[in-house]
Image (cartoon, helix red, strand yellow):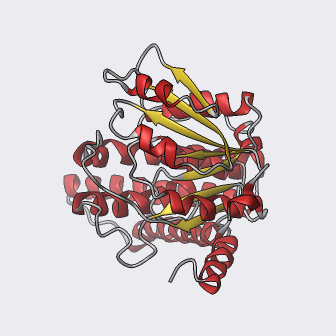
Amino acid sequence: MGSSFDGAGIGVVLPAHNEANHIGGVIRSLPDWVSRIIVVDDVSSDDTCAVVEGLQDPRVTLVRHSANTGVGGAMVTGYRAGLELGCDILVKMDADGQMAIEDLPQLVRPLLEGRAEYAKGNRFYVINANRSMPGTRKFGSVILTFMTKMASGYWHVFDSQCGFTAVRAHLLKMIDLDRVAKDYFFENDMLIWLNTTDARVVDVPIKTVYGDEVSDVRIGRVMWSFPPRLLRGWLFRVVRKHMLMDFGAIGALSIIGMLLTALGGLFGLYRLIESNITGVVNSTGTVMFAVLPLIVGVQCLLQAFVMEVAESPGAEETRSYIHSLIDSGDIG
């Protein structure tokens, strides 16, 4: 199988922070057709760098940060290093061994076949594939995935928190990497930025392996901090994609819907407060003046929502690719 990937210019980026116990095994397990391995050490306090250097693998490029930036910052550094090295495809993998190497070929294949510009792992597609995932992670991933669907516009993409991804290098040049989130919001923010370029994203079924590694992610902190950032991301994406880059039906419906909803809601709230203070009951006409724009505004927003779901870039490619995996017996 590996020979079909030879010469494809595939690089793997491994963001690493205190992964001395796992990173050596991850690097050794990567197939020969991976031409570049970029390890970004995010100021580890253990022997991560020593382990990497001790492997003496000519494919490995070790980049050291002078200050801790977070997984997103490490990935931006890794992406830029991959572009300088001439990689055509860059894969993101965690350095803790939680990602099954045997899934790497089917993650990369949609990009090589021209189906998509970005592939993202989905740990929930295959029944029992993620039984080893802690329950809190499952719950948090499902909730955050739904919110990320709305913020990013990729309604066919599930498991937004999965960090096993592959991207076409030329696509990274269309994104302002300096503005992409540098912490654990990186995965979600990447999807938002990708949608502004109309990049096709394919959802790929994968497995996960949970052993003795310790995650730095705290579900409570994530559930508290991510929603407002996703809301800002949604506003940014809608304005940039549907109003500035290409003003069409979705942009028009969104503007009209937000204006009418705000007008009806604020006017209705004002008249309700006034009525409670004065004791004067609002007339039917006054009530309708508040209700009618509210109803029309919500309908406009719902129509824009339906159109966005239908236009999710890569949805048809994902269905086609999964069917091909099922037909070939690679999943099922």
User: Residue at point 77% right, 42% down?
Assistant: 170
* 1 or 117: nearer the viewer: 1
User: Residue at point 64% right, 86% down?
Assistant: 327
User: Residue at point 28% right, 63% down?
Assistant: 139
Q: Quadrant of residue 207?
A: bottom left
Horizontal and vertical percent position of residue 21: 32, 37
Q: Determine whether 66 is above or below 21 in the image.
A: above
User: Residue at point 58% right, 33% down?
Assistant: 57
Q: In the figure, is residue 237 to the left or right of 217? A: right
Q: In the figure, is residue 56 to the left or right of 320? A: left
* 147 or 62: nearer the viewer: 62
Horizontal and vertical percent position of residue 232: 48, 43
Horizontal and vertical percent position of residue 6: 76, 52
Q: Determine whether 281 is above or below 244 in the image.
A: below
Q: Determine whether 125 is above or below 249 in the image.
A: below
Horizontal and vertical percent position of residue 64: 50, 19
Q: In the figure, is residue 211 to the left or right of 4? A: left
